[in-house]
Image: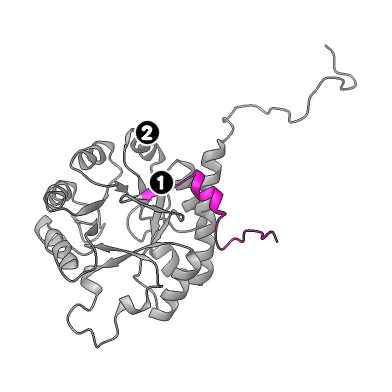
Amino acid sequence: MTTTPTLESPPAADAAADPFVFGGKPFTSRLIVGTGKYATFPLMKEALEVSGAEIVTVAVRRVNLTDRGKESLLDFIPKGMTLLPNTAGCYTAEDAVRAARLGREVGLSDWVKLEVLGDEQTLWPDNEALLAATITLVREGFVVFPYTSDDPIVCRKLEDAGAAAVMPLGAPIGSGLGIQNPNNLAIILERAKVPVIIDAGVGTASDACVAMELGAAGVLMNTGIAGAKEPVRMARAMRDAVRAGREAFLAGRIPRKRYATASSPVEGVIGKSR
């Protein structure tokens, strides 16, 4: 009996032909999701399940690490998802390194989405401190995924420092502005030898699709889903947009032209001179 693949899970053959390797591990979904800003934990869990994502970011500072008897964010992470602790809220390299160490010590992971912010209003990365923290954590055996600006030179330096991926922003965190500088991202994608994950600024499904059409290995988002009027429905839309964008990238878009090109042959058209 033959079964037809559903939208809930892509065909196994497709995943095998186009593997997503992140941190040295293979995944089928190229959507990475966060856990912040949801109205309730049960709503978060439902959205995570519908998204089809296999990797979920968790801010170390939001996890109850002392009293395991109390309700914890971790209790609502769907089974089988891979945790990616992050250092959200850190404004110095020292604080970010400390948070990463704490996450590993309590058994979360030796993976870390490294964030070192430079400004409370823009939440723009402090790339100098980010590079310093990356060097330290790589030396200590962490698998580091740094969140950075869309600067090709900084991304190259992070890669040279041992980052397992680079994660340039599409727009400021939580802004929903979409991809603001596709040319910079295209340069980063062209040069990088590690996965490039577009992180931050995605507001709706078309933004995620554009990021994937540029050639990104994946997209990371939180507010775009959690802040939607219907987070579960938006999670489903983001899931499908990431898949569609990847398919379009692999298919290869037609070149942009100034003038029209007929889709039907003109030979034999009545009144058409040779």
**Which of 202 and 72 lies nearest the eye of the viewer?**
72
* The stretch drawn in magenta includes residue 9: yes
The reply to whether discs 1 and 2 touch (Cβ–Cβ < 8 Å) is no
* The stretch drawn in magenta includes residue 255: no
What residue is at 25 percent from the left and 53 percent from the top? 124
Amino acid type at circle 1 is: Ala
What secondary structure predominates along the stretch shown in magenta? loop
**As drawn, is 255 to the left or to the right of 197?**
right
Boundaries of the magenta span = 2-21
Q: Position of residue 138 (x, y in %)?
A: 16, 49
Residue topped by disc 1? 217
Residue 76 sits above or below residue 203 on the image: below
Residue 12 sits above or below residue 60 on the image: above
Name which of mark 1 and mark 2 comes first in the sequence: 2
User: Is residue 227 visible to us here?
Assistant: no
What residue is at 18 percent from the left and 42 percent from the top? 161
Q: Position of residue 140 (x, y in %)?
A: 12, 53
Q: Quadrant of residue 155?
A: top left
User: Is residue 67 visible to us here?
Assistant: yes
Residue topped by disc 2? 190
Residue 37 sits above or below residue 200 on the image: below
| Residue extending farthest front | 1
Give the mark toward the camera: 1 or 2. Answer: 1
What residue is at 59 percent from the left and 32 percent from the top? 254
Element class at badge 2:
helix
Element class at badge 1:
loop
| Residue extending farthest bottom | 69
**As drawn, is 238 to the left or to the right of 87?**
right
**Which of 27 and 128 lies nearest the eye of the viewer?**
27
CA gap between label 1 and label 2 equals 12 Å
